[in-house]
């Protein structure tokens, strides 16, 4: 019997429980599988985990971040979540951060001979390097451990996919390329789209792999157009162009809904 557990950072459960319409691309096919397999669930990061040794995991996370690995075990590792993972046949991890943070529970499940199919979406993990070269072997050790404990690594960008095939060729059978797609039913594009009829151009997101300075430079070179930046990575006080408006927010906060 197939039963699936999705692990996300934050924001999905709030959207599902709300009565507002929302785009579904950030759910990574959750609704498709939910319709096909009724026993499909979601768990998310908690702001703080007081139920286990919080300080141990916090210190562990800080150590891993020195290797440029996004460990946030303090936000997800718990006995409740481990028991839930152990009941599932498939585990889908939405990002590198989630995959790294869930790794201790995945390893415990594997050590207890639990047969579980683990997949995670890769978003820039293979491009990051630690500040000091002496740390690179330790970083690679944990990457190998993460890949070994995973059945499928799903790349959303072809550049990183090709790079991973080159650097980690022995795992190439686990690598899959699935370019990111938007919810075309929600984001219904007018085929008669004309830029001059639009009120503004919207840049949205907080992905640390993005070049935020480039976005600012583009807007400054097009003073005849209006831009709205919805992000936490650009501060309004740092903008001196009248055609740029900055709105502070992040997707998981649901401060602005998708119809905004």
Image: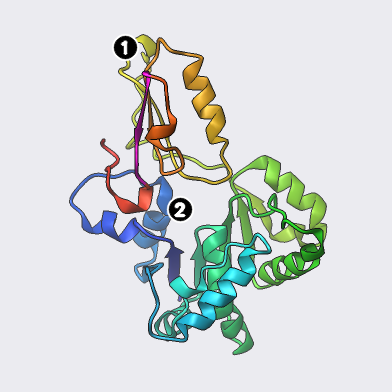
Would you name the residue on which mark 2 appears? 28
Q: CA distance from mark 2 to mark 1?
A: 32 Å
Q: Earlier in the sequence, mark 2 or mark 1?
A: 2
Which residue lies at the image location 76% right of the left edge and 47% below the top edge?
163
Image coordinates for residue 7, horizontal then vertical, percent: 45, 66
Which residue lies at the image location 32% right of the left edge and 37% below the top edge?
186
Residue 159 sits in which quadrant?
top right
- Please give the label number shown on residue 47: none
Q: Residue furthest bottom?
A: 112
Query: Above or below — where is 126 with respect to 249?
Result: below
Q: Residue furthest left?
A: 19
Residue 185 sits in which quadrant?
top left
Q: Quadrant of the N terminus?
A: bottom left
Which residue lies at the image location 37% right of the left edge and 48% below the top edge?
251
Residue interval drawn in magenta = 242-249
Query: Above or below — where is 4 with respect to 26?
Result: below
Query: Above or below — where is 204 with respect to 7?
Result: above
Query: Above or below — where is 18 with respect to 245?
Result: below
Image coordinates for residue 213, horizontal then vertical, percent: 55, 31
Which element type, helix, strand or loop, lies under badge 1?
A: helix
Q: Residues within 10 Å of mark 2 (few under 14, many from 20)?
A: some
Would you name the residue on which mark 1 appears? 197
Q: Is residue 127 visible?
A: yes
Image coordinates for residue 39, horizontal then vertical, percent: 36, 71
Which element type, helix, strand or loop, lies under badge 2?
A: loop
Q: Nearer the viewer, residue 170 or 89?
A: 170
Residue 113 sits in which quadrant?
bottom right
């Amino acid at each position: 019997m197939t039963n699936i557990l999705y692990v996300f950072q934050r924001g999905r459960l709030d959207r599902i429980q709300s009565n507002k319409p929302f785009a579904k691309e950030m759910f990574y096919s959750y609704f498709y599988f939910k319709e096909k397999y009724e026993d499909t669930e979601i768990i998310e990061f908690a702001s703080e985990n007081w139920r286990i040794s919080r300080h141990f995991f916090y210190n562990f996370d800080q150590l891993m971040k020195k290797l440029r690995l996004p460990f946030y075990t303090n936000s997800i590792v718990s006995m409740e979540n481990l028991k839930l993972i152990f009941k599932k046949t498939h585990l889908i991890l939405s990002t590198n951060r989630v995959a790294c943070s869930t790794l201790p529970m995945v390893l415990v499940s594997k050590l207890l001979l639990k047969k579980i199919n683990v997949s995670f979406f890769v978003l820039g993990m293979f491009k990051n390097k630690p500040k000091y070269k002496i740390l690179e072997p330790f970083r690679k050790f944990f990457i190998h451990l993460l890949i070994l404990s995973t059945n499928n690594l799903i790349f959303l960008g072809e550049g990183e996919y090709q790079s991973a095939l080159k650097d980690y060729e022995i795992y190439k059978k686990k690598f899959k390329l699935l370019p990111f797609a938007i919810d075309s039913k929600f984001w219904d594009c007018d085929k008669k789209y004309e830029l001059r009829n639009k009120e503004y151009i919207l840049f949205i997101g907080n992905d640390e792999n993005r070049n935020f300075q480039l976005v600012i430079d583009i807007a400054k070179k097009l003073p005849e157009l209006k831009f709205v930046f919805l992000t936490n990575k650009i501060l309004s006080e740092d903008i001196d162009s009248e055609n740029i408006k900055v709105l502070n927010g992040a997707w998981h906060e649901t401060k602005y809904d998708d119809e905004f």
